[in-house]
Amino acid sequence: MGNRLNSAFLSAYIELDKVCCLKFGAATGGITEYINRLITARFAPDRDDVLPRLVKYRNIRNRMAHEEGAFGKIDEIAKADVRWIQGFKKAMQKKRDPISLYLRKTRRYARRRRLRKVLIIAALLILVLGAAAAFIMSKFM
């Protein structure tokens, strides 16, 4: 069971890495890129759940790939880990992962700030034009 589960884990991890690579335009290391961006996005939703999992899974994958004979010896993987990776991959494809949600939130915030600036400038312009019109009208009356 262990080798089959490890194989399923590695397969799911590789699929997730490919999705991450596509998202960030990276040739390799998509999950590492995701982790790095998640570290800088301190206010990303579910960050505290996703970040430690991705780091844990990356460490397991690195041990599998780089330590001699480790693939068959690693026994800390559960079916739930494979399901989580597959679910996270689907969330990324639907843009419901923490980074996608964070980016959507920051874009919305930036749009609101720009709109607020435009409204303030428009209000000031109306005040200035109103004051200028009142001044001109007072000269002719």
Image (cartoon, grey):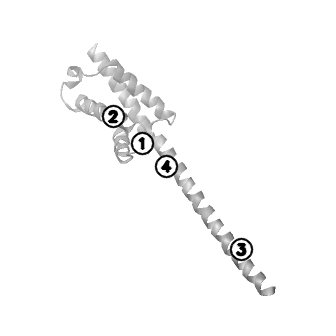
Q: Residue 141: x and y, percent?
A: 81, 85
| Foreground residue among 87 and 106 | 106
Sequence-wise first label, 3 or 2: 2
Q: Which residue is mark 1?
A: 44
Amino acid carrying label 2: it is Leu
The CA span between labels 4 and 2 is 23 Å
Residue positioned 31% across, 18% down in the render = 5
Secondary structure, mark 3, is helix
Q: Which residue is mark 4?
A: 106
Q: Which residue is mark 2?
A: 54
Q: Residue 78: x and y, percent?
A: 31, 19
Q: Are marks 4 and 3 in contact (CB under 8 Å)?
A: no
Residue positioned 28% across, 30% down in the render = 61
Crowding at mark 2 (Cα within 10 Å: few <14, some 14-19, many 20+): some
Sequence-wise first label, 4 or 3: 4
Q: Which residue is mark 3?
A: 130
Residue at the extreme left of the image, as rendered: 68
Crowding at mark 1 (Cα within 10 Å: few <14, some 14-19, many 20+): many
